[in-house]
């Protein structure tokens, strides 16, 4: 572990002292301890720091969030939030300041060091990426000015290069976001599990609760990796349609078990099955990807208490699946981009997602020579319908 210059911003003197000792034990240099946002800014003005450990609730006019906004603007130093709360209201407040990490009190030294290392690594990589992007954009601008009049075809090539670089940036940003939140949840929950595990059986409900959080976070990471690997195969033209005989009832049962296990809000899924054959011949893996992504989106973007309807019918050797929800919907102006990779509508808010689900659905349907249609009116109803040729 490399040595860092760290500023501690904590209005509880006992907590600040414990944090100082824990950090100094790992050879970090504490440049100061501030009990208010104003004092923290004064210290930073006189002393350079590598990272700031910031308590959210501070006395004075500047709380931890406002202080972090000023630090982001003036110093561009990574900030790790410290809080005893992990409720949705607190997370909503801090998400706009783009913190490098979020640590739940109480914490142990090992996990604290891990969070600090991740925060520093993320900050350095983001700055390296920004520097590369700035340099690349400047080169593109210079070449465009020099060559535009002489060679329009070259200008088109440069524009294509710019689009590719934007796509790369979007990949980095989306994957970074997709990993950051689950990893933070895993660290926090594992920390709490360790504390509760030392207690007697009255803590079992809490242990179960946080074990569920870990499971959901790991599932999120796994789905993201699956999506990336999926497009790796697609881009290399290695995707193949491999039909085989499958039991439709067992498929639906497995699909719904996975969907229900992944639901993190109070949304129900209603299943309506038409006159289906006992068996069909198709690619079960591609079929699972289609309905898993459609149903996951339906539940994820619905509000607590709402219901997602899943209808499955069979007609003229075609499997017809329909997913209907009454969630946030898709803005009209953005519906044309819906199946693009990494696209996420502006109204998704802080709901996690990679923007890959519907592009995976589209690719699978193309391979299976099916079709997909949709209609959406935000906050009223969204309907996705897929028609896939199969054999009995």
Image (tube, grey):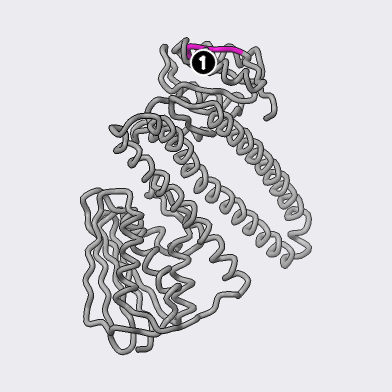
* Residue 95 locus on image (x, y percent): 44, 36
Q: Which segment did they paint magenta?
A: 32-38
Tell me the residue at 44%/33% (across/down).
194
Query: Which quadrant, please, contains the C terminus?
Result: bottom left
* Residue lying at 55% horizontally and 33% vertically, measured from the top left: 115
Q: Position of residue 388 (x, y in %)?
A: 38, 80
Q: Quadrant of residue 256?
A: bottom left
Taking the spot 43% from the left edge, 23% from the top edge, the residue there is 56
Query: Is disc 1 surrounded by few (<14), some (14 to 19) or many (20+) residues within 10 Å?
Result: few
Residue 354 image position (x, y, % from top left): 48, 54
Q: Secondary structure at mark 1?
A: helix
Residue 370 at x, y percent in the picture: 41, 80
Taking the magenta stretch, the answer to whether it contains residue 37 is: yes
**Residue 287: which quarter of the image?**
bottom left
For disc 1, the marked residue is 18
Q: Residue furthest front?
A: 200
Q: Is residue 89 above or below residue 162?
A: above
Please say whether residue 129 is one of the residues in the magenta stretch. no
234 w.r.t. 244: above or below: above
């Amino acid at each position: 572990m490399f040595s860092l210059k760290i500023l501690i911003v904590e209005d509880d003197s006992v907590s600040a002292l414990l944090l100082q000792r824990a950090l100094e034990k790992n050879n970090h240099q504490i440049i100061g301890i501030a009990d208010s946002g104003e004092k923290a800014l004064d210290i930073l003005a006189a002393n350079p720091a590598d990272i700031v450990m910031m308590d959210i609730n501070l006395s004075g006019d500047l709380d931890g969030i406002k202080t972090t906004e000023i630090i982001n603007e003036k110093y561009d130093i990574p900030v790790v939030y410290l809080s005893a709360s992990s409720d949705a209201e607190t997370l909503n407040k801090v998400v706009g300041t783009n913190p490098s990490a979020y640590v739940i009190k109480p914490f142990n030294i090992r996990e604290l060091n891990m969070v600090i290392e991740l925060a520093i690594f993320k900050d350095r990589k983001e700055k390296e990426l920004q520097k590369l992007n700035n340099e690349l954009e400047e080169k593109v601008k210079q070449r465009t000015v020099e060559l535009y009049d002489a060679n329009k075809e070259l200008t088109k090539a440069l524009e294509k290069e710019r689009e590719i670089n934007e796509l790369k940036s979007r990949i980095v940003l989306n994957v970074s976001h997709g990993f950051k939140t689950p990893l933070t949840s895993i660290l926090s929950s594992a920390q709490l599990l360790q504390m509760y595990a030392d207690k007697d059986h009255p803590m079992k409900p809490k242990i179960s609760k946080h074990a569920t959080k870990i499971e959901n976070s790991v599932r999120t990471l796994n789905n993201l990796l699956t999506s990336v690997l999926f497009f790796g195969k697609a881009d290399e033209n290695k995707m193949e349609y491999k039909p085989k005989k499958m039991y439709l009832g067992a498929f639906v049962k497995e699909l719904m078990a996975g969907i229900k296990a992944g639901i993190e809000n109070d949304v129900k899924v209603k299943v309506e099955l038409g006159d289906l054959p006992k068996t069909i011949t198709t690619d079960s893996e591609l079929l699972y990807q289609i309905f898993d992504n459609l149903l996951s989106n339906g539940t994820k973007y619905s509000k607590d208490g709402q219901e997602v309807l899943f209808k499955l019918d069979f007609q003229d050797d075609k499997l017809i699946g329909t997913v209907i929800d009454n969630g946030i919907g898709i803005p009209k102006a953005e519906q044309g981009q819906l199946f693009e990779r990494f696209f996420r509508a502006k109204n998704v808010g802080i709901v996690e997602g990679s923007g890959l689900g519907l592009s995976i659905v589209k690719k699978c349907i193309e391979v299976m020579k099916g079709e997909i249609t949709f209609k959406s009116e935000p906050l009223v109803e969204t309907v996705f319908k897929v028609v896939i040729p199969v054999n009995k």
